[in-house]
Image: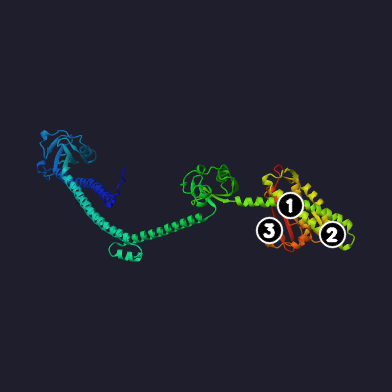
């Protein structure tokens, strides 16, 4: 079906204007004809009343009917009191209705002295105007004098007024059409000039030059319109160039990324996919835009994670082992996309970062640490046994001191090996190498046990341990691991506390609902630049003092992994010269 051609200005504005003028002219002519007819009728009635007055005066003086002469267009009739026609100026009374008593004007004259009517006459078969009045002759008889006028005599001027108005309307319509055609021709010429200039305009001519050139040939209104159109065109072109540049930059960034990026609609249809993502899924060279993701990526774990991100409408992180890619491990970040007009989610952005090699290296590292620790354990046990035998055979004081140094370092090495094995077991929890038993634990009981276990060590250093626990709080966890975490935090605080100081073991419920287990000391404090790394393995702020006090550098790292296994987290707050507070948080037991 071919599109309708747009109408020209003549058809859009000219023809409707002429039709309106025609309707207005005809209406005005009809209105003026009606008003002029009414005006002429009233004037004729007034003239007839004047003539009637003169005739009544003549009759009252006794002048005979034959002497009453009327103008040619008026008709005079004399009627007796009982309605009989006595004389008529235009008709033979023998041929007339001989009784006019019940005519409207006659009845009005009898009642009030004068009467008028505008009616159809059966005698003349036309519309007439009538006036009548009563008079008493000198002989004492009462007569009725009636004057009539044919309405056609006053209709001719009214028709003339209507014809004049119609003629003026026709003239105005013709003039309007001529003016519209002239304006249309002029507008076509000026719009043609603007079109030519728009086609020629480019880098060789500026907007000011073009408007000055145009102002000599077209009206100022169209020049201003041209300037506005051209400025809008330039602004639109700038926006278009900016959008193309931004799109080009975005495409360049996506193409240069090593991470896979997939933009999806809420219906899981692919909006865009960068080259890295197409390489990951083996889709290079395939047109996948607009296709359902499940048609080209057949991995239930990834699809379920994306659906979860769409349903929740929140940022989501997962590390997935994708079966469709031969067990390769991917770190997946799923972030909602929102429409620019508002907060309505329009889709999700999926970012894929392959961690297969990293996880393989981590497994190698964990296996190496575990294997080395196991291999060192046996010879170290033998060394410690021989040290005990040498204590019995060495008698001189110098030899005994040397044996004490060897014994102290072997004990420290044994502690490091034990901590490495513990850390290895904790890190391997996701691989189910540890069979953990979770139970309901009252924090108050566990804190008392931990404080009792480190009591001897704290008394040797001269440090007091105080507990502050909120009654009734409990968690679900592994009793041995939570106990070990508390002991590690307490031993760390004892190690860096001065004699005659106090350590506080705290158990409380946070506003978030999690349970916090904290150890607060009044030691030297820790500079802010070290706080972010305190829970890394083998990291020490004062390595010399840590070794002197028997620290392995793994205790806080073990606490961190214990918190992670229980779905919690660790943290530290410290102020130099005031002290430090180490804490771990664990979700509260649901039924508490």
User: Between tags 3 and 2, which lies in front?
Assistant: 2
- Counting from the top left corner in percent of width and height, residue 438 is at 72, 43
Quarter where residue 125 is shown: top left
Decide if residue 293 is on the left or right side of residue 37: right
- Residue that badge 1 annotates: 373
Mark 1 surroundings: few (<14), some (14-19) or many (≥20) residues within 10 A: some
Decide if residue 553 is on the left or right side of residue 35: right
Which element type, helix, strand or loop, lies under badge 3? helix
- Residue under the image location 10 percent in, 36 percent down: 92
- Residue that badge 2 annotates: 403
Which element type, helix, strand or loop, lies under badge 1? helix
Q: Earlier in the sequence, mark 3 or mark 2?
A: 2
Decide if residue 533 is on the left or right side of residue 6: right
Whether pointer 3 and pointer 2 mark residues with C-beta atoms closer than 8 Å, the reply is no
Which quarter shows the N terminus? top left
User: Between tags 3 and 1, which lies in front?
Assistant: 1
Residue 394 visible? The answer is yes
- Counting from the top left corner in percent of width and height, residue 333 is at 57, 50
Decide if residue 570 is on the left or right side of residue 402: left
- Counting from the top left corner in percent of width and height, residue 233 is at 38, 58
Q: Mark 3 and mark 2: span between their CA atoms?
A: 36 Å
Q: Earlier in the sequence, mark 1 or mark 2?
A: 1
Mark 3 surroundings: few (<14), some (14-19) or many (≥20) residues within 10 A: few
Residue 267 visible? The answer is no
Q: How is the image coloured?
A: rainbow
- Residue that badge 3 annotates: 533
- Counting from the top left corner in percent of width and height, residue 420 is at 73, 52
Which element type, helix, strand or loop, lies under badge 2? helix
Mark 2 surroundings: few (<14), some (14-19) or many (≥20) residues within 10 A: some
């Amino acid at each position: 079906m071919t599109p309708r051609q747009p109408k020209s200005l003549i058809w859009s504005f000219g023809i409707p204007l002429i039709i309106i003028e025609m309707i207005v002219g005809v209406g005005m002519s009809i209105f003026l004809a009606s008003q002029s007819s009414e005006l002429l009728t009233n004037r004729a009635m007034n003239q007839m009343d004047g003539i009637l007055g003169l005739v009544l005066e003549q009759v009252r003086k006794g002048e005979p009917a034959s002497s009453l002469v009327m103008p040619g267009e008026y008709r005079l009739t004399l009627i007796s009191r009982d309605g009989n026609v006595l004389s008529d100026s235009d008709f033979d009374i023998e041929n007339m209705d001989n009784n006019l008593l019940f005519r409207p004007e006659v009845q009005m004259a009898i009642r009030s002295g004068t009467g008028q009517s505008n009616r159809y006459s059966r005698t003349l078969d036309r519309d007439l105007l009538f006036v009548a009045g009563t008079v008493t002759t000198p002989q004492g008889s009462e007569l009725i004098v009636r004057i009539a006028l044919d309405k056609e005599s006053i209709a001719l001027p009214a028709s003339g007024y209507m014809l004049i108005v119609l003629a003026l309307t026709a003239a105005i319509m013709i003039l309007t059409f001529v003016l519209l055609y002239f304006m249309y021709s002029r507008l076509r010429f000026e719009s043609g000039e603007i079109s030519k200039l728009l086609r020629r305009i480019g880098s060789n001519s500026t907007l000011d030059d073009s408007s000055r050139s145009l102002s000599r040939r077209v009206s100022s209104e169209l020049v201003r319109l041209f300037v506005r159109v051209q400025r809008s065109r330039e602004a639109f072109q700038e926006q278009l160039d900016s959008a193309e540049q931004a799109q080009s930059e975005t495409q360049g960034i996506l193409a240069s990324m090593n991470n896979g990026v997939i933009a999806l609609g809420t219906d899981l249809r692919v909006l865009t996919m960068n080259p890295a993502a197409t390489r990951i899924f083996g889709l290079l060279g395939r047109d996948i835009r607009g296709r359902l993701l499940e048609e080209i990526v057949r991995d239930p774990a990834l699809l379920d994670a994306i659906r979860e991100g769409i349903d929740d409408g929140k940022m989501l992180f997962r590390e997935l082992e994708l079966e469709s890619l031969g067990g390769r491990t991917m770190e997946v970040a799923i972030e909602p996309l929102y429409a620019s007009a508002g907060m309505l989610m329009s889709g999700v952005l999926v970012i894929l970062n392959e961690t297969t090699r990293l996880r393989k290296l981590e497994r190698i590292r964990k296996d190496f640490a575990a294997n080395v620790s196991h291999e060192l354990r046996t010879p170290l046990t033998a060394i410690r046994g021989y040290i005990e035998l040498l204590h019995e055979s060495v008698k001189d004081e110098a030899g005994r001191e040397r044996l004490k140094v060897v014994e102290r370092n072997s004990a420290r090495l044994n502690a490091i090996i034990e901590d490495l094995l513990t850390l290895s077991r904790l890190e391997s929890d996701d691989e189910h190498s540890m069979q953990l038993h979770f139970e309901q634990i009252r924090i108050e009981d566990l804190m008392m046990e931990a404080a009792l276990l480190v009591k001897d060590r704290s008394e040797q250093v001269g440090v007091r341990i105080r507990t502050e626990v909120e009654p009734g709080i409990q968690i679900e966890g592994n009793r041995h691991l939570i106990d070990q975490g508390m002991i590690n935090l307490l031993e760390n605080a004892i190690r860096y506390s001065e004699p005659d100081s106090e350590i506080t073991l705290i158990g409380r419920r946070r506003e978030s609902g999690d349970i916090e287990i904290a150890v607060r000391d009044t030691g030297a404090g820790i500079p802010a630049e070290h706080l972010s790394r305190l829970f890394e393995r083998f990291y020490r702020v004062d390595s010399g003092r840590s070794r002197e006090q028997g620290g392995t550098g793994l205790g806080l790292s073990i606490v961190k992994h214990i918190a992670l296994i229980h779905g919690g987290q660790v943290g530290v707050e410290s102020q130099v010269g005031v002290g430090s507070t180490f804490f771990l948080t664990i979700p509260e037991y649901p039924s508490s």
